[in-house]
Amino acid sequence: MAWFTNDFNQFFKDLAKNNNKEWFDANRERFEASVKKPFEAFTGAVIERVARYDKAITITPKEAIFRINRDIRFSKDKTPYKLNCSAIVSPGGRKDHASPGIYYELGPEHVAIYGGVYMPDKQQLERIRTAIMDDPKGFRKVIEAPAFKKLFGGVKGEANKVLPAGFKEAAKKEPLIANKQFYVGTEKPARMVVAPDLMDVLIEHYQAMRPFNAWMAKALQ
């Protein structure tokens, strides 16, 4: 079954041309019917599916879904609304930027699917690097799994040019130790928003990233 109608993406296309509070308020009922409520239902179903495999997932859709309002405090772009819907299904939900989970973003530009650890703090980063240094073969086994490589290609993230002394030698053997982010992701065509197999595709990607997420979660403990 399709979770969304064509008006999901059309709403955001129209919003892009009228990104202001007056237009949004005038179209709030349309937003509720075509975007907000269907996305909440979809996210509830994602949580239910993911929780079958990860008992740490006990969040609600509200805890997973990001607000449509943009944070414009430090941005030159003062348009108030995002042009997509996004959520993260992880133990901590949208308020936790380090716990591994599955992040997805639906809109007229793409369907994006991401996982792993996007914003580890200094202590968390050190734990991840130490875990890789202590078990480089185990780490490689996870990121070279066929399904993982097929769907995501590899691990993404910015890397530090200068590493703490304790990791420099290990980084010669495993360059990913230099990363300060450890995430995976892919983007699909926007038409997938209305595809009947959207949920199946999302869960397929979740299954492929599960061992990587689990490895990262263990490293962070």
Image (cartoon, rainbow, N blue to C red):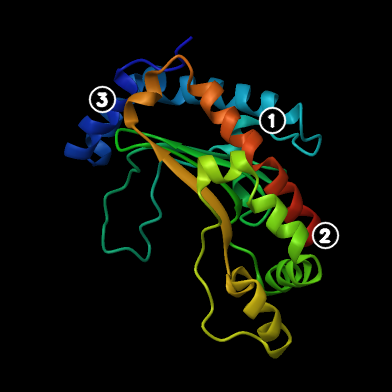
User: Which amino acid, mark 2?
Assistant: Gln
Q: Residues within 10 Å of mark 2 (few under 14, many from 20)?
A: few
Q: Nearer the viewer, mark 2 or mark 3?
A: 2
Question: The C terminus appears in which quarter of the rendering?
Answer: bottom right
Q: CA distance from mark 1 to mark 3?
A: 29 Å
Kindly identify the residue that appears in the image at 50 percent across and 38 percent down: 104
Q: Residues within 10 Å of mark 3 (few under 14, many from 20)?
A: some
- Quick one: label 2 or label 3, which is nearer the N terminus? 3
Q: Which residue is mark 2?
A: 221
Do the residues under discs 2 and 3 have CB atoms within 8 angstroms?
no
- Under circle 3, the secondary element is helix
Q: Which residue is mark 3?
A: 10
Do the residues under discs 1 and 3 have CB atoms within 8 angstroms?
no
41 shown above or below 158: above
Camera sees residue 63: no
- Quick one: label 1 or label 2, which is nearer the N terminus? 1
Q: Which residue is mark 1?
A: 50
Q: How many numbered discs, if any?
A: 3
